[in-house]
Amino acid sequence: MYRNDGFRELNRPESLSRLATAVVGRIVHTREALPAVLPVNFLLEESGAVLLRTSASSELVRAIDGAVVAFEADDVDAAAHSGWSVVVTGPASVVTDHDEHEHLVHSGPRSWVPWPVEVFVRIEPELVTGRELVGGRGVDMLPSASARTSEPPLAKEC
């Protein structure tokens, strides 16, 4: 994490606890040698692994199966200047065990876009990091309109 940036680091249990409350996250992977980010719904397993469900023929599956990826989810309250962000980094792999796949069909995440043939992708949590900001600045950076107009104008020099 980045020290002294005003955020509090979350430990692994805190991070996973926050992540379990999120509905949508973002998977970060490589596409044509460039970073790519894709929003996805997911399920967090008890082990901390992130489980995705998607089309067996998707470009995403081909791009991430066997690759190290990052997965990020967050929750932000813009009015309160607070929120958290959690990142899980590790290898992604398609679930190939038939019995496990059948179990996940009933207990795993539901795809928001159902496909004729779906697969499950698991991201193993080798590295879990989290950050939290509580209360932020709490003040606006710009003065209100009334504060701007209540001050006398600056005198111009000739």
Image: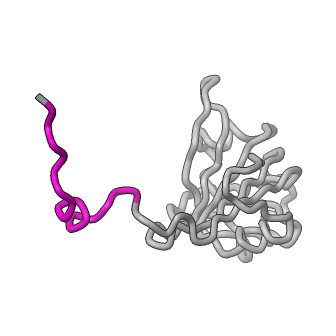
Q: Magenta segment range?
A: 141-157
Residue ID at (85%, 51%): 127
Of 143 and 84, the residue lying toward us: 143
- Protein image colouring: one colour
Of 59 and 127, the residue lying toward us: 127
**Above or below: residue 83 compared with residue 56:** below
Q: Name the quadrant containing residue 143.
A: bottom left
Question: Is residue 149 located in the magenta-colored stretch of the structure?
Answer: yes
Q: Residue furthest front?
A: 158
Q: Residue furthest top?
A: 33
Residue ID at (50%, 73%): 80
Residue ID at (11%, 28%): 158
Instruction: Answer yes or no: is residue 26 visible.
Output: yes
**Above or below: residue 43 compared with residue 33:** below
**x then y, percent, for residue 157:** 15, 32
**Above or below: residue 122 compared with residue 91:** below
Could you tell me what secondary structure mostly forms the magenta stretch?
loop
Q: Is residue 120 left or right of residue 143?
A: right
